Amino acid sequence: MKRMENMDSERFIEMMERYLRHEATDEEKVELSQWIGTSRMQRALDGKYTDLWHSVSPELDSDTRSEMWQNLSQHIREERAIGRRQVMKTICKIASVVLLPVAVFLAVVAYYEGGQAKSDTTPFSFVVDSGQKASMTLPDGTKVWLNSASKLSYYPSYNRDDRRVFLTGEAYFEVAKNPDKKFVVACQGVEVEALGTTFDVKGYDDDAMVSTSLLEGSVRVSHQNQSVLLAPSEEASFDKTKLVFAKSKIEDSRQVDFWRRNILYFRSATLAEIAKTMERLYGVSVEFESDELKNISFSGSIRNNSLTNAFYIISLTYPLTYEIDRDVVKIGLKQ
């Protein structure tokens, strides 16, 4: 008989998604119910972590949150043990906004139920796949929105010793005020420090720049012995090759979080740069007929409702052709 306490947490999240979407098989429902019935999950779901659950899922509407809580807490039967270290080590792959609070909840429960001493060196890590977005609330109340193909990590000591998170990709932060503990985002060798403010950080592995855009408050962006202080509606861009900062004014503050509202915003972006964005958003591969096409620039905003619509809008501006074949997009020049 399969030992449910050793169920991989990634599989649990996948099954929870299927269950909430009413796509789970009868076998999966039984397996999920048995895993939720472990002794530590029972203690976690027996009222002790009710407040925690509500704190990590404030972005959900009340009906969805209640449904998820009921799905988690029902059918508590058997006394079994959850493999805490396995949950802690597994990177939770997030397939939808709804499931991120579940991942946060399980990670925090695993940490507190299993004891703190051995887990302080193992971070909580949350990954958003290409084509997806997610939101979460950190233990101190800071709200975070993660863009496609992004990863956010923090150690269990977060908000106890410090407030430091590690980002690869793009995230929008609404930082909870705490004058005694600065909030730090570490991204691609750049650190962004704040106390209580709203800003966006973008730094993918294959990006030439790490950018920080400030909406409210103030932040200090630094790399080694260099630093830039930002005021609202200012942006700092760090060149990862030249290792220098450039500061500029944000003309339209709405552009900072366009991506949260499913709007693509490009300002003098080359088609090569746009292709990177499309690949992250839609999980496709973009191929160009010639290298010259990669250098064509485009400025404008596009309602991000489909891959076809995005390329159609761009093709109205330039004499381009596009062909979408499953997960490959081929860009050419009209003859």
Image: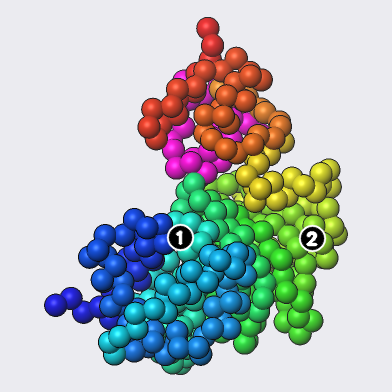
State yes or no: residue 114 in magenta.
no
Secondary element at image label 1: strand
In the rendered structure, the answer to whether residue 48 lies left or right of residue 79 reads right
In this image, 86 relative to 54: left or right? left
Q: Nearer the viewer, residue 15 or 252?
A: 15
Residue 240 in the image: state x and y as whole percent.
Answer: 62, 51
Q: Residues within 10 Å of mark 2 (few under 14, many from 20)?
A: some
**Which residue is denoted by mark 1 in the rendering?**
94
On the question of residue 243 being in view, the answer is no
Q: Amino acid at mark 1?
A: Ile
Residue pictured at 44% horizontal, 56% vertical: 95
Q: Is residue 86 visible?
A: yes
Decide: marks 1, 2 in contact (CB < 8 A)? no
The span picked out in magenta is: 269-292
Q: Secondary structure at mark 2?
A: strand
Q: In terms of sequence position, does the residue under pointer 1 or pointer 2 come before the other?
A: 1
Q: Nearer the viewer, residue 181 or 245?
A: 181
Q: Is 283 within the magenta? A: yes
